[in-house]
Image (tube, grey):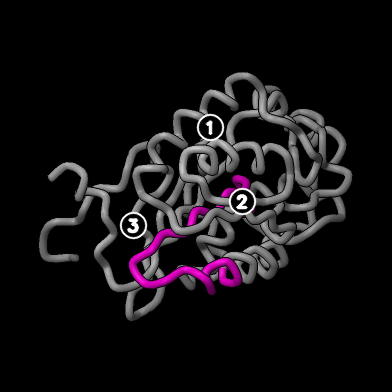
Amino acid sequence: MAADRHTYSAPGRRVVIWRHGRTAWNLEGRFQGQSDVSLDKVGREQARKAARLLAALKPHAIVSSDLARAADTAEQLARLTDLPVALEKGLRETFAGSWQGLTDAELRERFPDEFAAWKRGEGVRRGGGETETEVADRVVPAILRALEGVPPRATLVVVSHGGSSRVAIGRMLKLPPEHWGSLGGLSNCCWSVLGEATRGWRLLEHNAGSLPEPVIGDDT
């Protein structure tokens, strides 16, 4: 039956890591970091549409960054599922100090060496803020704390940000930090799905905007 297609039948738990909807700063290409920027009109509509899809997964719990753009995205799913949203400071985006609020062009002009090193994939403390490994050090424990109350075969939805989501996925998949950049970024209001297996977490979907499909074949 169609209603059974999205029932999670694996013995472990499932984590949906969902990026917030669009903001005006996204549109302007500004580095947001932990600046508390709200969703714009398009972002709110993205959140409503995505929530209707994710509600079909029948999540057990929702946890979100406490920044407005993530919390407001999470609230759209909460309204459809009657679940509370647990706000978690540990899920915030990277703190980027003096980079926050600047466009790529402004960053290249003001911090040329630091910006170039970051683009090369080096572990730069952007704007005097956090490194990627420091972000993973707080985001992954926040996800694991939320998972403590999630039973087997159930789904946790984590609402976070582009950079924090990518490093969390990399850490949970046990990839070395120098390989985290191989994970493409999440588009606004898209998500990645991790499934718990006997050998650790597996990446089931990445940068998705549709419901996860069952894997049929020899690699299940």
Task: Tell me the element at label 3.
Answer: strand
Q: Secondary structure at mark 1?
A: helix
Q: Earlier in the sequence, mark 1 or mark 3?
A: 1
Q: In this figure, which residue is indicated by the disc labeled 2?
A: 85
Q: Residue 5: give x, y in percent of width and height.
A: 20, 48
Mark 3 surroundings: few (<14), some (14-19) or many (≥20) residues within 10 A? some
Rendered image: mark on residue 47:
1
Q: Is residue 156 magenta?
A: yes
Q: Viewer-nearest of labels 3 and 2?
A: 2
Which residue matches tag 3? 204
Residue at the image position 40 percent from the left and 54 percent from the top: 193
Asked if marks 1 and 3 touch (Cβ < 8 Å), the reply is: no
Q: Is residue 113 left or right of residue 58?
A: right
Is 159 one of the magenta-colored residues?
A: yes
| Three-letter code, disc 1 | Ala
Position of 114 relative to 23 (above/below): below
Q: Which residues are magenta?
A: 144-164
| First-in-chain label (2 vs 1) | 1
| Displayed quadrant of residue 31 | top right
Image position of 67 with respect to 167: above or below? above
